[in-house]
Amino acid sequence: MSTTTQSTLADVTASDATLRRFLHGLPGVDQVGADQRAAGLGSRSIKTSSKKWALDLAISMVDLTTLEGMDTPGKVRALCSKAMRPDPADPSCPHTAAVCVYGDMVGIAKSAVQGSPVHVAAVATAFPSGRASRTVRLEDTREASAAGADEIDMVIDRGAFLAGRYLEVFDDIVAVREACGDAHLKVIFETGELQTYDNVRRASWLAMLAGAHFIKTSTGKIQPAATLPVTYLMVQAVRDFREATGQMVGVKPAGGIRSAKDAIKYLVMVNEVAGPDWLNPDWFRFGASTLLNDLLMQRTKMATGRYSGPDYFTLD
Amino acid sequence: MSRTDVRKTYKLYIGGAFPRSESGRTYLVNDASGRLLANAAKASRKDARDAVVAARKAFGGWSGRTAYNRGQVVYRVAEVLESRRAQFEAELAAGGSSGAEARAEVDAAIDRLVWYAGWSDKIAQVDGSANPVAGPYFNLSSPEPAGVVAVIAPASALLGLVSVVAPLIAAGNTCVVIASEVVPLVAITFAEVLATSDVPGGVVNILTGEVAEIAPWLASHMDVNGLDLTGVTDADLARDLEVAAADNLKLVRRAGVENLDDSPALDRMTRFMEIKTVWHPMGR
């Protein structure tokens, strides 16, 4: 892929046919090889000072998420205070990157995190299914953006993607990015519904060509959500995309990452596959809710030398 | 044709499974006369950590069962132990007990399980109370299980283990037990009995290894609610463990010489139960 030049990339989105030719021309994924490589990267041992550093980095990369029908303003405010000071007992603990809420909660979250560096991310475009007309999805995005969201998490139309209508998905992403205004755009693929690793690679390139700032694995509503091999393919894609175009795109695995140990596996993989440039909350995020507590527990264990328990941390 | 014996690998018992130690270590276990019996797994602090996680996970379900049902399960442990008594007598004899001693120990262990099984749904009546108060309220106190209890089992292969574990699980606690360092093998065989008698995985977790290495991690663990030091013989270690346990106000049963042949007592249950008192408005 390093042979792909910028000029050829500009042409591939000219028509449905050229886009399909380009996406289907991407090298196929060796599924067994990808699984094995991801598992191998997950077996590294990260200890002592490296572990401390990794835990703090992982905390600063968390998009603390609540996406439930039962979300209340009170719960969103509580989540925001946790995002700003994850461990109230320890001022040296970093804040999380963002809170991630539904569009109608953006105003509440925005006022709760005011004055802090924590961003507010909103899911939009008829999340999580994306099954609504383009007008409705764009209006959803504009509302969230107008309410002050710093980041918009959109879902792609998996139906159109799987049916092979790639240009339609491309145009969707372009239109949503326009509707975002200044907000950063994260594009959710819902990899659990994409069926094959080849599709994950195609979706990654499609979204990056359409101008996504971040590519994100899942909504968290479908199993399997983020997995190591799928994220591995996406990290490979952003690396290759930078090689081809010079533009950097971020990656956000979301859903199913619950333990500090898992989070560190992802960090090792990002470092090995894409490089240390991506080891930064601007370029790599975790979409999670329970993960933060385990990171805090491990951090406390490192600091105090004794095992901590879930009783000592708030349930988001 | 000659045949190679298929010997059992003695492993740990964590969360209803029999894993090897995470560290891969083992140690030699000898009988009373110094003859090698087998290798036992030598648990590390990470095994202890995993065991606490398993015990915590099992606590909600186990403590939420009716006391009657817990009693039935403990009784079932006695039944299964009875049906496998020949195996236990043989293992105890291999460890150096005489045939009569081994039989007596298995008898006592089974009887003790039955005794605590019976108390499971009666302890609330004996230890709880209806308190008269000066107001229009019912005021009721009842004992509730404390949570996850770490136990250092005494140096008695079967009876010692049963004497500390049965009261804890009958009361609704879940536990992480460090089996006796010198006679750990029968404890793992007893784990096979637990695993096949309706005791949910994680309710009892059994570690074998060096007490001085593992016990401090359990004593300082913030997610452990009780610490039973019955099997600690080293006074300095016992003191250190009590100090570590004070950090999150664990309930502690202190180390002390006790004769396991004595009749069982209820204080082993009540020590790891906390009294909950509720006020309820009285209707007309």
Image (cartoon, coloured by chain):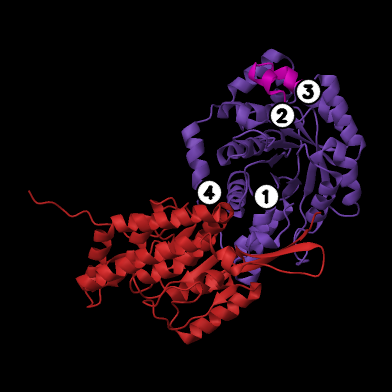
Chain colours: A purple, B red
Q: What residue type is labelled 4?
A: Gly
Q: What residue type is labelled 2?
A: Ala
Q: How far across and down, in percent of the image, does residue B58 sit?
A: 54, 54
Whole-Å distance between the Cαs marked 3 and 1? Answer: 32 Å
Q: Are marks 1 and 4 on the same chain?
A: yes
Element assignment for label 2: helix
Q: Are marks 3 and 2 on the same chain?
A: yes
Q: Name the residue under label 4.
A: A42
Q: Residue A172 carries which label?
A: 3
Q: Which mark is residue A207?
A: 2
The image shows residue A134, relative to residue A108, as above or below, that is above
The image shows residue B105, relative to residue A29, as above or below, that is below
Q: Residue A290 carries which label?
A: 1
* Boundaries of the magenta span: A156-172
Disc 2 + disc 1, Cβ < 8 Å: no
Q: In which quarter of the image is the N terminus of chain A?
A: top right
Whole-Å distance between the Cαs marked 2 and 1? Answer: 28 Å
Task: Return the chain for callout 1.
Answer: A
